[in-house]
Image (cartoon, coloured by chain):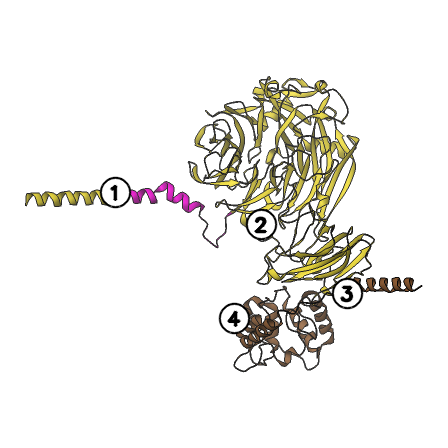
Chain colours: A yellow, B brown
Amino acid sequence: MKRFTLQIGIALSGMVLLFSGCNQGGNAANGALSSSAAEKVYVAPGEQDEFYAFLSGGYSGNLTVYGLPSGRMFKEIPVFSQFPTSGYGYSEETKPLLITSHGFIPWDDLHHPDISQTNGELDGRWIFVNGNNTPRIARVSLSTFETEEIIEIPNSAGNHSSSFITENTEYVVAGTRFSVPVPQRDMPINEYKGNFKGALTFINVDPEHGHMDIKFQVIMPGFNYDLSHPGRGKSHGWFFFSTYNTEEASTLQEVNASQNDKDFIAAINWKKIEEYVNNGGGTEMPANYAHNVYDESTHMARSTMKKKVLTVDPTKVPGAVFLLPTPKSPHGCDVDPSGQYIIGAGKLSADITVHSFDNMLAAIEAEKYDGYAYGIPILNFEEVLAGVVKSGGLGPLHTEFDGKGNAYTTFFISSEVVKWQLETWQVVDRKPTFYSVGHLMIPGGNSRKPFGKYVVAMNKITKDRYLPTGPEMEHSAQIYDISGEKMELLYDFPTHGEPHYAAGCPADLLRQNSKKIYRLDENNHPYSIKSPVDARVEREGKDVHIYMSTIRSHFTPDNIEGIKVGDRVYFHVTNHEQDFDVPHGFAAIGANTSEILVMPGQTKTIVWEPKQVGVWPFYCTDFCSALHQEMQGYVRVSPTNSSIELSWSVGE
Amino acid sequence: MKLISFCFFLSLLTLGCGEKKEKEDEGFKIERKSSQSETKKSTVESTGVKASERIDLTNKGVGPITLVNLGDEINSEMAAQGEAVYNQMCLACHRIGKKFIGPAPNGILERRTPEWVMNMILVPEKMVKEDPLAKELLIEFNGSPMANQGLTEEQARAVLEYFRTLK
């Protein structure tokens, strides 16, 4: 009996243990951390994200569109790289977008997206990005999510302190990272010092159409201009550029550009320079650079070469340019939402340097100069300094703001995001990143009105975060909830290419304006047809133009004869669908190019040069209806000397 | 001389060869016949009439249009506008006087109500799901979906007026 009781006792206590174990397990599963993190990033099927995020693709040359908080990728927008998925850079209409003074360039290294602003707040009209390698600035429409314009930057090389915009989108600014001879000329490399120059380019943005035009270039000393941001609010009218290699080294910069204890943040009063050039100031210089504009009504881009640029010698405009000493090769150069603080992140330092705009004005007024660099006043460091953030981390890079008095800075070497307070300069929180974070982004976080709910950290190293995919893998991003006092890591997601900065905005800002179709009756493409009645084939010597239309699920015409080996055949395909999300694709066997994906109401052209006699098929590449597999046609290709007449038909 | 005329004859033959028709394979004819009659069977209702030929002058279809007043006279101006819209938006699949991807619109108002026609133009994706006749038509026409071409009600009404001019 005793034994029995004991057994029951043991059994009962075991049950209690079991239950309490269950409870603990339950707590862990539904507890504060794991469950709420999952709920915070979970966007249920059919639901939509709260924010758009536009991540630069770095060496992919393109821009990617994500949703936050889910981290789902919605689109890759081709900008500087050919994109066979849509035919961008392959179609006759889009090839001109990639023309430069160096010819057709199918790739670039895309950095630093920035959304257009009005009164310092995101207005969601366009997003600007820079091509770093062959210096260019592109403008992407946020109604079509397509690249509409690319302008090449002369006298620039390594277009890195770009493409940041002033608070009414008056200018998009592009600064050179690598200084070069200006104008370019044949000279010894080791005569860099004093001879190479750094061009800071102010590109005027037409307020209605967004068209870009270089207003002026400030020809600065031969430093490396690394990053930049505009003043806002009280400092609107100024622009700030971080510099390194003020040593002006041309070799082994890894060592030689880190000799000076302090480099500079260059403060440019662009309003003053604008006034100077409006009054006839500046020197017109011969140049050669491409300006490529896509016209939505003709569905076609045109490239023109521009032949001159207005340059400004900063020493000729008194009171327009000053240098703010900033420790340890500053990289990030960020301005807080009020416009009062300019943050310089010395990338080899543990600390973050914060300059005060008011102090800067006072120092300029009182001429507190420590000297001059090539005639440009160097302001006294202590006079301008507002504070130093003693971070305890190493290798600060970039800073964004939540609009509630906090700043968030990434630390590359110590792999973390550090949250600190403006004005007290106190660190209030820090969270690790996985691994080696570069940029970070809070939607609106570089404007007057940040949406301080999430921060996305874009990491350079992925290592063990995902299933391995061989030596090469996508970079990893991490999203943190920053709505509370402490940051909370919510989720990891892979990113495409290498994101160098991102821009984000509330989904509501763009959702309503996102275009669904192109109207057929507004299609002014010279080779479009508005009715299948107009479908035809015309020969001009060796060039053959096929005016073709598509609708679910056939091509008009779909039988074409009279093409000959050696012809250059242009398929001008107009998609006659007028319904959302019904593109048709077009591909022809043996085409030395890509497919084209034609949106409803749009016309695109692909060239086909048949090399072999035969009857060759073409087909629709986008699954368009239940009869998509039937959407195909044939071209009969005859010998060069054949006398077969051109003919075409459908359904005969 | 004989040789020359022979050569001429040969060259004629060769020319002819360039244009010669390759003989079509007839091997599958029987199979085709049987499959045709099968298709017929499946689209013929108990009435024995194909959906496209059936007359239904009461069904107004499913969609935004519940009442259309056709004038006694054809409004020729509206019909002309309708023809322009039709040529741009509809002709790729609906040819006048002959079956193409979809049926010809000739005499449509002898078989359908004006409301049904306009609903089919304006909300085809809804019609093929909810209107039994439209559903049958989709099957009869090979599963080829009618595209929503985004016409306004006014444009659809004009197209309807154009249909009245087609005998």
Left or right of A404, for residue A292: right
Task: Name the residue type under label 1.
Answer: Gly
Mark 4: which secondary structure?
helix
Q: Amino acid at mark 3?
A: Lys
| Chain letter for mark 4 | B
> Residue A443: percent from the left, percent from the top?
53, 41
- Residue that badge 1 annotates: A21
- Which chain is home to disc 3? B
Bounds of the magenta span?
A: A23-50
Q: Is residue B125 above or below residue A588?
A: below
Identify the mark nearer the N-term, 3 or 4: 3
Instruction: Tell whether position A41 is magenta.
Output: yes
Q: Which residue is mark 4?
A: B130
- Of badges 1 and 3, nearer the viewer stands 3
A25 with respect to B153 (left or right): left
SS type, badge 3 = loop
Query: Along the line of sight, which residue is nearer the eye, A241 or A396?
Result: A396
Residue at which label 3 appears: B20
Residue at x 62%, y 62% (from the top left corner): A630
Chain of the residue that carries numbered disc 2 in the rendered image: A
In contact (CB < 8 Å): disc 3 and disc 4:
no
In the rendered image of this protein, does residue A70 appear above or below residue A309?
A: below
Q: Which residue is mark 2?
A: A510
Between disc 2 and disc 3, the foreground one is: 3
Q: Are dots 3 and 4 on a single chain?
A: yes
In space, the residues marked 2 and 3 are separated at their CA atoms by: 61 Å
